[in-house]
Image (spheres, grey):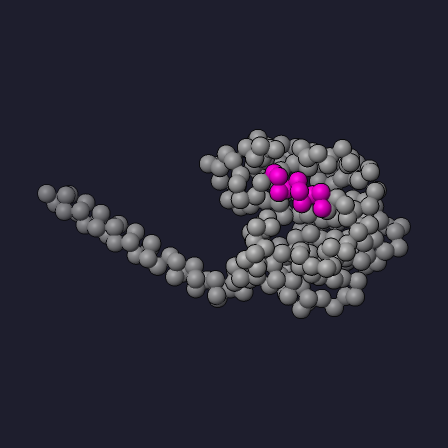
Amino acid sequence: KLKNTIREFVYSLNRRYTFTYRLLRPLWKAFRLFREPRRRGEFLGQPLLKRKHQFQDSTFTLHYRYPRLFEQCRLYFQHHPAPRILSFGCSTGEEVFSLIEYMPQAIIAGIDINRWCIRECNLKNTNEHISFDLRHSGLFDELTGLDAIFCMAVFQRAANRDKKVVRTTKITFQRFERELKILDKKLRVGGLFFIDVCDFDLADTLLYTNYRPLEFDANRIENDLPVFGRDNEKIANTRYFHRVFVKLR
């Protein structure tokens, strides 16, 4: 009888906790949203009519995040007087500000869909070789003849890391390939295309015949994240990727 009484008491506490948690969780998320500028920016910084064009749903980034790729870019363009570079999905600018340290002679454009991110970038920017603007802007539309394009951790969603996910829907292969076609038109022949932390493989696209992997030691890596094919079905959790490509035609 005592055991039953204790068990009922524990169950009662558990039910109360669950109810309280479900009640307070939205309030806690709302509090964090308006307390933390980055979270608030992720939620409010994207125009509702443009959210269908969104890929990555987080603005997290770091300085010097891809040092081996940045160094390879520097070596490739070391004799170029002013390489023109696009950071696609630049977030709050850390990638752009890192690249300009590797290549002070470069002219770099940072593009993002999030208005808050671009506002933060412009507040920090003091370099006349750097410009920032929105994905749906005149600056992006006018970019052509680029020497390099960086798409780092852009074409992916954190939700796809769930082992239960066998098909991606929030971001599809068709949207991925369509956006690559837009970027491909902006890159000159002989230019470099950098892509990493991606839910899809560039080698699976129809554009791949226009490219070849750049030869250097750190280019081919083992990827342990989910990869989705042309049918948006999960292919594997482990696959080898190239991260840097040269445009052939």
Percent position of residue 72, x then y = 78, 45
In the image, farthest residue toward the front: 49
Quarter-of-image position of residue 106: bottom right
Quarter-of-image position of residue 243: top right
Closer to the camera in the image, 122 or 16? 122
Residue at the image point whose x is 89% and y is 50% from the top: 79
In the image, farthest residue toward the left: 1
Chain part drawn in magenta: 173-182
Closer to the camera in the image, 199 or 7? 199
Instruction: Name the dominant secondary structure of the magenta segment.
Output: helix
Query: Does the stretch in magenta take in 177?
Result: yes
Quarter-of-image position of residue 226: top right
Residue at the image point whose x is 77% and y is 54% from the top: 143
Closer to the camera in the image, 203 or 46? 46
Residue 198 shows in this picture:
no
Closer to the camera in the image, 199 or 4? 199
Q: Is residue 193 left or right of residue 224?
A: right
Q: Is 184 drawn above or below residue 61 in the view shown?
A: above
